[in-house]
Amino acid sequence: QVQLVESGGGSVQAGASLRLSCAASGRTFVNIDMAWFRQIMGKEREFVAAFSWSGSTTYNDDSVKGRFTISKDNARNTVHLQMNNLKPEDTGVYYCAARTNVGPYNYWGQGTQVNVSP
C-alpha cells in the first residue's frame, strides 16, 4: 500500500508560481512511478507530469511543458510539481498518483485545489 498526501495548492494571479508537494508513505519510495494529474471543471482528469522509478520525466506537452517541472526527493519520500507562469486554464484540482507496476496508476491522493485568476 502507498499513502499519498498533497499540499501546496492555493489561489494566485496569472503569471505567478506555485509548488505542489506529495508526501508518500507505505513502501519503498524509490521503486515506484509518481505522477501528477489534474481535473479541470467540466473536463476529464488529465495527465500533467510523471517521474519514473528510473529517473525519467514526462510531461503533457500540449499544456504544461516549459512551465511545469516535476522533481523527486527520495530522502523525504516526496515528489514536487513546480508550476511557473500559471494561467487561468490551469485552475483545477491536482492529484498525486503512484503505481508499483506497469499499467494504470493505482494509488491516489485526495487532491489539492489550484485557482488562477486573470
Image (tube, grey):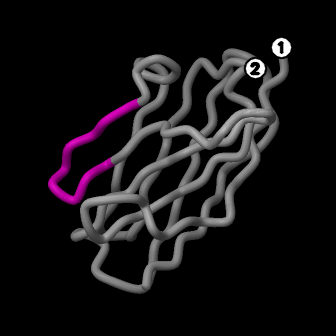
Residue 10 in the image: above or below residue 84:
below
Badge 2 amino acid: Pro
Crowdedness near tag 2: few (<14), some (14–19) or many (≥20) residues, C-alpha within 10 Å:
some
Q: Quadrant of the N terminus?
A: bottom left
Q: Position of residue 64 (x, y in %)?
A: 49, 23
In the shown orientation, is residue 96 left or right of residue 31?
right
Give the SS element for disc 1. Answer: loop
Residue under circle 1? Answer: 118
Q: Position of residue 98 (x, y in %)?
A: 41, 64
Q: Are marks 2 and 1 in contact (CB under 8 Å)?
A: yes
Residue under circle 2? Answer: 88
Give the SS element for disc 2. Answer: helix
Residue drawn where x is 46% and y is 72% of the image: 24
Q: Marks 2/1: CA distance?
A: 6 Å
In the shown orientation, is residue 102 left or right of residue 46?
left
Magenta extent: 51-59
Q: Position of residue 69 (x, y in %)?
A: 41, 34
Residue 53 covered by magenta stretch: yes
